[in-house]
Amino acid sequence: MPESLSAAHILAEKIDREGPIPLSEYMGIANAAYYAAKDPIGEDGDFVTAPEISQMFGELVGIWLSDLWLRKGSPDNSHYVELGPGRGTLASDALRTMARFSCDPHIHFVETSPVLKEKQAALHHGATWHETIDSLPTDGPLLIVANEFFDALPVEQFISTPDGWRRHMVARERNKFVAIPDTAAVTNQVASTSGGLPDGAILESSPASVQILGDLSSRIAKQGGVLVVIDYGYDRPGTGSTLQAVKNHMPISPFDSPGTSDLTAHVDFHTLGNIAKTRLLSVHGPTEQGQWLKALGIDQRAKKLAESAPKQAESIRAAHHRLTHLDEMGRLFRVMAASSMDWPEPEGFVYGEI
Ligand code: SAH
């Protein structure tokens, strides 16, 4: 049976057996199957990410990390940690650049997809792989990078109904997956703190993201270092569903053929920033990706690259535009960093403090 059938199959059997399941469980099962089955990144896949658009992206992440590490006094035994490294491209560009500043950390990848692990292994021989963040080293500063990682983690949703707040569940109706309000009332914080919203209002949260961000923040507080999250998301609390599915670069319904499309939700930077603060980290941003890359010198880098490869000048210009322009990735994508209190202030955050 093709892998694509099996996620829908597993979900259908589970729902038929147990009744409706929480949306977060549906998303978790669908995405695990999706990433296990194939490499979805690139023009011939389902979506393209910033490091795949141009080497400039990873290089600037590398410069940003090197700068912090140098100003901290080049601590030994530092670890480069990437969450969901995809094809390993960002790590290649970042680590190559860091090596120029004699910043040569141990490499750790947190990755669940066997297909992507294989691609990463072809580029990074000395890396260590982790299924979860739990096995990351507990000694030495952590330089943690997460580009388009948190958007892939499951979200749960709560919907306001005339009978009060209900969790969004996924059921099956006429052989199709559909989201329905749970029959039981919600007894968590949502019920007590979210009065006054109209019927049909949706509140979203990602417990998995909160858990990971919180655990990593505690480690950074203890071990030193920094975490940078780059993703699409929102800076202020809001309402409405941000769940979306993409297949072949086109949006489709998140409930059509789970496991064959990339299910994502916008990242709640407001909550993630607050979690980092409660773990006593210093939080920077979120700011716009375009602004951050420009502050780090992407204009100058693009110019230099075009000068050294004139035949590629047009594609370099196009990549620069895609990464930075407000109508492209420049505004939708946000950058937020959280650093240990005794580390220097990271560069690139001109405005946008939460
Ligand atoms: N950062 C890469 C890839 C983004 S796609 C880039 O910018 O190109 C999302 C990545 O997260 C993939 O590598 C995927 O396999 C990984 N991933 C998704 N869910 C995960 C999870 N729960 N744990 C670890 N990795 C996960």
Image (cartoon, grey):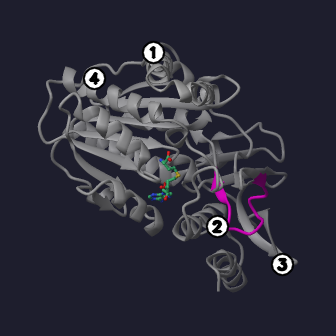
Q: Is mark 1 within 8 Å of ligand 1?
A: no
Three-letter residue code for mark 2: Tyr
Instruction: Return the disc, 3 or 1, that comes first in the chain's sequence.
Output: 3
Q: CA distance from mark 3 to mark 2?
A: 15 Å
Farthest left residue? 76
Marks 4/3 in contact by CB < 8 Å: the verdict is: no
Circle 1 — which element? helix
Query: Quick one: label 4 or label 3, which is nearer the N terminus?
Result: 4
Distance (Cα) linking label 2 and label 4: 41 Å
Q: Is residue 184 above or below residue 300?
A: below
Q: Answer few, some or many: residues within 10 Å of disc 3's Cα (few below 14, many 20 plus, some between 14 and 19).
A: few
* Badge number at residue 300: 1
> How many discs mark residues in the rendered view?
4
Q: Earlier in the sequence, mark 1 or mark 4?
A: 4
| Residues drawn in magenta | 251-264
Q: Are marks 3 and 2 in contact (CB under 8 Å)?
A: no
On the image, numbered disc 2 is attached to which residue? 26
State which mark lies toward you, 2 or 4. Answer: 4
SS for dot 4: helix
Give the amino acid at mark 3: Asn
Question: Image check: 174 left or right of 51?
Answer: right
Label 3 SS: loop
Which residue type does callout 1 highlight?
A: Gln
Asked if the residue at label 2 sits under 8 Å from ligand 1, the reply is no
Is residue 252 located in the magenta-colored stretch of the structure? Answer: yes
Question: How far apart are the two marked residues, 1 and 4, measured between alpha carbons?
Answer: 17 Å
